[in-house]
Amino acid sequence: MARMHSRKHGQHGSKKPIKKIKVDWLIYDKDEVEKLILKLAKEGKSSAEIGLLLRDQYGIPDVRYFKMRVLKVIEKDHKKEVPEDLYNLIKKAVNVHKHMDSNRKDSKGKHGLELLESKIRRLGKYYARTGKLPKGWKYSIDEAKLLVK
């Protein structure tokens, strides 16, 4: 699939093979892994950080081994007002907007901010259509600054 704003296709990577082999050295079961995920989420870790911590500190190679996803386990317990990927884009846009306030003549930065806000609006429309955001959700930089703080 092509990139959104660059017309390039990028490198096509292979998918991780599904593990059907029983791992003998794994000491955690499904319920314990779910409790670990919820504990790490309450500490404020993102889903990517939780996956890395489970792999590096707890020796759990992949949560999919237990036929579950980190983000779905987190969403069952407490639903966030904005999905994680959209929140990360909004945080980036707020930082670029701060940069643009002090550097008015940065034309490449201005173009990058336009592309970033376009991605946010597009993703926001998708999430509003699927019900993860309210139907009339609109992006504005003032609300974004409040959300990130």
Image: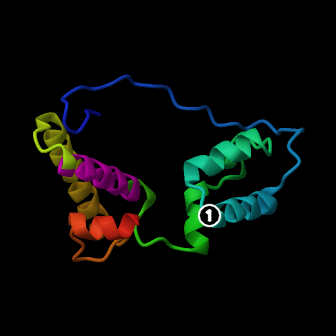
Residue at the spot of label 1? 73
Quadrant housing residue 124: bottom left
Question: Which residue is rendered at x = 23% and y = 68% of the image?
Answer: 142
Q: Residue type at mark 1: give it.
A: Val
Whether residue 139 is visible: no
**Can you say whether 82 is above or below 27 in the image?**
below
Residue name at image x 75 percent, y 59 percent: 36
The answer to whether residue 106 is seen in the rendering is yes
Q: Secondary structure at mark 1?
A: helix
State which region is magenta.
86-101
Question: Looking at the figure, which quarter contains the C terminus?
Answer: bottom left
Q: Quadrant of the N terminus?
A: top left
Q: Could you tell whether 5 is left or right of 9 in the image?
A: left
Query: Percent position (x, y) of residue 44?
Result: 60, 62
Decide: few, some or many residues near mark 1? Use Cα within 10 Å; few <14, some 14-19, many ≥20. some
Residue at 78% x, 43% y: name it.
57
81 left or right of 79 in image: left
Report the predominant secondary structure element of the magenta stretch.
Answer: helix
**How many discs appear?**
1
